[in-house]
């Protein structure tokens, strides 16, 4: 009853937040949380309704919940393959007027393509929207978007023509070189490495002079920079490259490390 549209909005939002936290914390809660939203017909229809609700708080929490449900495994993919209304609603949230909805939608779309390429065909409409989000004013949204972009070529070449048509690779390269926020730059560099698994996209990256454009990023590298940083989590708050805070050198060094690994990949044959 807490996820019924007749329930007070605040109660529904709190229920979504609590369930989202549970499933993000541990996959052990996945079955329980899915049961809450499965509904009497088993079609998760409440989620598709929430994604279109007039209240932005409800839309953003639904996107976040979907992202966290898909954080640990691909069980939800089967539902999204059968329920176009949910996935279409999620994709539409990428261009929502509310910044928090866009941020959470980018996170969810990224997780919808992380574990396998099962949803690739249905994610085609998301690609041009993700390109636009690489210029979103919210740093975390751009970081989530860059990560999502990298997942779109990780499992197969199904989306390569769409990626090329949207000019996703040049836009990611622009973010990697000039965004100014290390968390975005690192995620963009990791995304380009992932997309470069597809030979055609790797050739495109070389063709837009990626080697020359990425080389200046190496100026922050130190001899101890060996481990590839993971994409920044929501709790990460690195300083900008221009900042003088202690974390700045670490963040800039992370950018240099990722740039170096991508450059080595681009300079190898194949």
Image (tube, rainbow, N blue to C red):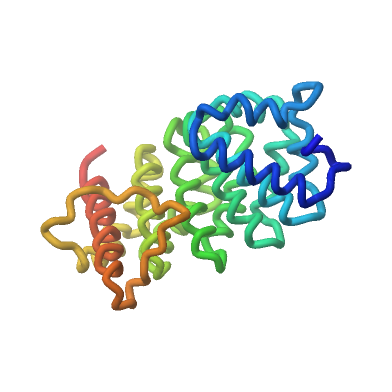
- Answer whether residue 204 is visible to the viewer in this image: no
Residue shown at the point (64%, 31%) measured from the top left: 33
Residue 139 in percent (x, y) is at 50, 64
Which image quarter: residue 50?
top right
Residue farthest along the top direction in this orientation: 41
| Total number of numbered discs in the rendering | 0
Which image quarter: residue 4?
top right
Q: Quadrant of the N terminus?
A: top right
User: Which is nearer the eye, 218 or 59?
Assistant: 59
Residue shown at the point (50%, 52%) measured from the top left: 144
Left/right placement of residue 252 relative to residue 162 reads left
Left/right placement of residue 201 relative to residue 4 reads left
Residue 190 in percent (x, y) is at 36, 49
Residue 39 in percent (x, y) is at 77, 27
Q: Quadrant of the C terminus?
A: top left
Residue shown at the point (41%, 63%) measured from the top left: 237
Residue farthest along the left direction in this orientation: 223
Residue farthest along the right direction in this orientation: 6
Q: Is residue 100 above or below residue 76?
A: below
Left/right placement of residue 76 relative to residue 190 reads right
- Answer whether residue 134 is visible to the viewer in this image: yes
Residue 37 in percent (x, y) is at 72, 31
User: Which is nearer the eye, 192 or 99?
Assistant: 99
Residue shown at the point (72%, 48%) measured from the top left: 13
């Amino acid at each position: 009853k807490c996820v019924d549209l007749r329930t007070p909005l605040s109660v529904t939002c709190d229920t979504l937040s609590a369930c989202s936290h549970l499933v993000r914390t541990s996959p052990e809660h996945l079955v329980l949380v899915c049961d809450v939203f499965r509904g009497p017909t088993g079609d998760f229809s409440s989620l598709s309704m929430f994604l279109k609700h007039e209240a932005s708080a409800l839309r953003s929490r639904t996107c976040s919940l979907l992202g966290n449900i898909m954080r640990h495994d691909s069980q939800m993919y089967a539902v999204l393959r059968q329920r176009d209304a949910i996935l279409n609603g999620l994709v539409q949230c990428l261009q929502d007027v509310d910044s928090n909805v866009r941020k959470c939608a980018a996170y969810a779309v990224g997780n919808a393509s992380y574990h396998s390429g099962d949803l690739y065909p249905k994610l085609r409409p998301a690609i041009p929207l993700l390109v636009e989000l690489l210029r979103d004013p919210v740093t975390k949204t751009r970081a989530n978007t860059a990560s999502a972009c990298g997942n779109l070529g990780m499992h197969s070449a199904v989306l390569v023509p769409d990626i090329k048509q949207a000019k996703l690779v040049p836009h990611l390269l622009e973010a990697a070189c000039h965004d100014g926020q290390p968390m975005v730059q690192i995620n963009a560099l990791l995304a380009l490495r992932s997309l470069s698994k597809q030979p055609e996209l790797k050739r495109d990256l070389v063709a837009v002079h990626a080697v020359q454009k990425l080389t200046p990023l190496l100026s922050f590298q130190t001899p101890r920079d060996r481990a590839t940083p993971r994409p920044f989590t929501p709790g990460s708050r690195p300083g900008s490259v221009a900042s003088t805070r202690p974390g700045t050198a670490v963040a800039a060094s992370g950018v240099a490390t990722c740039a170096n690994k991508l450059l080595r990949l681009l300079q190898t044959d194949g």
